[in-house]
Amino acid sequence: MDSTFVPIPKIVNGGIAGIVGVTCVFPIDLVKTRLQNQQPGPNGQVMYKNLADCAVKTFRNEGFFGMYRGSGVNLLLITPEKAIKLVCNDFFRHVLRKEKTMRSLSRL
């Protein structure tokens, strides 16, 4: 078994995973946030009726890139967070592995 741990590829993979994750989930999160923040008008009417209505109206009014408005902040926060999680997970797995068996934390 190779005893070296190389973190650079894991950092890159974690960063890519963070970018892909934000790209896939952000439109749903945007719609959820808009639904949570909408305020009823004077007659009790609301802008969005449900999740699908909000998604369709947002897409029609703002286009494809409107579904990603504000995602830059998430990319800046989530990308390094996922990279750190992946590197730490793999590092501790590497450290705790002895031969082909896993070491117990109590037996370090």
Image: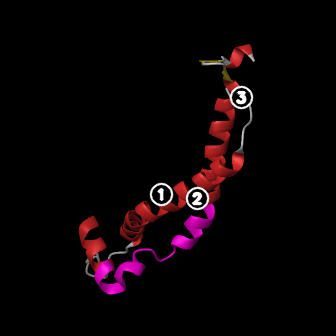
Task: Label 2: state its secondary structure.
Answer: helix
Compared to residue 31, the image places residue 93 above or below, namely above
In the picture as drawn, the residue positioned furthest to the front comes out as 1
Q: CA distance from mark 1 to mark 2?
A: 9 Å
38 vs 63, nearest the viewer: 63
Judged left or right of residue 59, residue 16 is right
Dominant secondary structure (helix, strand or loop) of the stretch shown in magenta = helix
Q: CA distance from mark 2 to mark 3?
A: 26 Å
Numbered badge on residue 95: 3
| 1 and 2 marks in contact (CB < 8 Å) | yes
Tell which circle, 1 or 3, labels the residue nearer the N-terminal end.
Answer: 1
* Position of the N terminus by quadrant: top right
Tell which circle, 1 or 2, labels the residue nearer the N-terminal end.
Answer: 1
Numbered badge on residue 90: none
Q: Amino acid at mark 2?
A: Ile
Q: Which residue is mark 2?
A: 78
- Around disc 1, counting alpha carbons within 10 Å, would you say few (fewer than 14), some (14 to 19), or many (20 or more)? some
Numbered badge on residue 21: 1
Compared to residue 97, the image places residue 78 above or below, namely below
Q: Which segment did they paint magenta?
A: 59-78
Q: Nearer the viewer, mark 1 or mark 3?
A: 3
Compared to residue 29, the image places residue 46 above or below, namely below
Q: CA distance from mark 1 to mark 3?
A: 28 Å
| 1 and 3 marks in contact (CB < 8 Å) | no
Q: Position of residue 54 (x, y in %)?
A: 29, 72
The answer to whether residue 20 is visible is yes
The reply to whether the magenta stretch includes residue 98 is no
Judged left or right of residue 21, residue 51 is left
Judged left or right of residue 14, residue 65 is left
